[in-house]
Image (cartoon, rainbow, N blue to C red):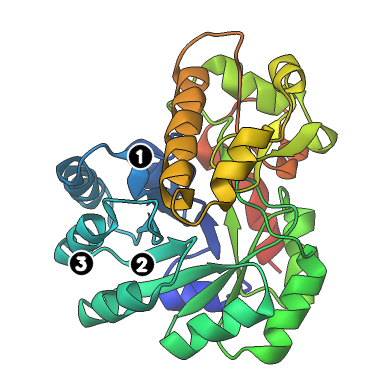
Amino acid sequence: MKKLALCELLGIEYPIIMAPMFLVSNEKMTIEAINSGITGAIPALNYRTTEELRQAIRTIKESSSGPFGINLIVNKSNFNYKNQLQVCCEEKIDFIITSLGSPAETIQMAHAAGIKVFCDVTDLKYAQKVEKLGADALIAVNSEAGGHAGKISMKDLIVLLKKNCSIPVISAGGVGDAKGLMEAMEMGADGFSMGSIFIASEEAPVTNEYKQACVEYGAKDIVMTTKLSGTPCTVIKTPYVAEIGTEQNWLERFLNKNKRLKKWMKALTFLKGMKSLQKAAFGQTYKSVWCAGPSIEHVHNIRSIKEIVADLKPAFEA
């Protein structure tokens, strides 16, 4: 069995994090991931209140014995960030994944509570910053990641970070099968964050239409849009997405550049976009905006998480 640094960090059998996916990730999926020998993380934003977040953490702990994490948006657009961080520290989860902001406060508080912190990074400059702050690992978000993707290819980003950083590099994006895992390991990846291939799982709470879209569409159908959160985000190019386009209009762009209004405009754009995603994920509507990454190329049917993980295991079994 090939053991990567992520296995050592978390004490898991296979070095895979089932990536935190907005609206998709939940307790049931995370428990099944843990039971399959990997780990999982859930966005704190999937819960309306901090008490719901607290209860979710306790539910996972009661039903499994492995490690799991919570993803925190640590910039000003997440008005509930401090409360979410407090709950994570009080409940002593195993790790936190930080996104879209400075992780300084998160690292300080999490480490005091014995919690590891993995930071989303898309380039070397930011990776070196979070390493100096004390991050335990880097989530190397490359240009093929789902959601908020980076701009550097998987190979170039892994090689760049491995050469210039001394903490583990967890690759995120562009991998959806055992062959891809083996190729990324040869590049130097210390672990993997994989999300999109788990959307079409039996345990995922989204509609069958969303799951079936991950089966029917492929890598060529993934486009980047700024309409959902103001930050470029990958979605499946459904007929509706093609109809409305993927760029903000001139007024939205103008307001996003205004120093006084930018913070509020980002929050409003995010709220509007998330409501759109929620309607599509949980209800039948022709206005389908479904988040996914290019790795749906490897999704051919709807299966259990256990079956999906089983197909990935040969990459680590020599």
- What residue appears at the point 43 percent right and 40 percent down from the top-left corner? 25
Name the amino acid type tagged 3.
Cys
- Helix, strand, or loop for circle 1? helix
Determine crowd level at label 3: few under 14, some 14-19, many 20+ residues with C-alpha closer than 10 A. many
Considering the numbered disc 3 on the image, is that residue within a helix, a strand or a loop?
helix
Which numbered disc flags the more N-terminal residue, 1 or 3? 1
Circle 2 is placed at which residue position? 95
**What amino acid is labelled 2 in the image?**
Phe
Q: Quadrant of the N terminus?
A: bottom right
Look at discs 1 and 2 and give the one toward the viewer: 1
In 3D space, how far apart are the residues under numbered discs 1 and 3 (Cα atoms)?
18 Å
Q: Position of residue 216 (x, y in %)?
A: 75, 22
The x, y position of residue 289, in whole percent, is: 61, 24
Dots 1 and 2: beta carbons under 8 Å?
Answer: no
Check disc 1 and report the residue beneath it: 46
Left or right: 291 as drawn, with respect to 175: left
Look at mark 3 in the image and give the residue it sits on.
89
Separation of marks 1 and 2 at Cα, in angstroms: 17 Å
> Callout 1: 10 Å neighbours few (<14), some, many (20+)?
some
Contact flag, marks 1 and 3 (Cβ < 8 Å): no
Marked residue nearer the N-terminal end (1 or 2) = 1
Residue 202 or residue 235, whichever sits in front: 235
Residue at screen point 67% across, 22% down: 213
Q: Is residue 86 above or below residue 30?
A: below
The kind of secondary structure element at disc 2 is strand
Q: Is residue 248 visible?
A: no
Q: Of discs 2 and 3, which sits in the foreground?
A: 3
> In which quadrant will I find the C terminus?
bottom right
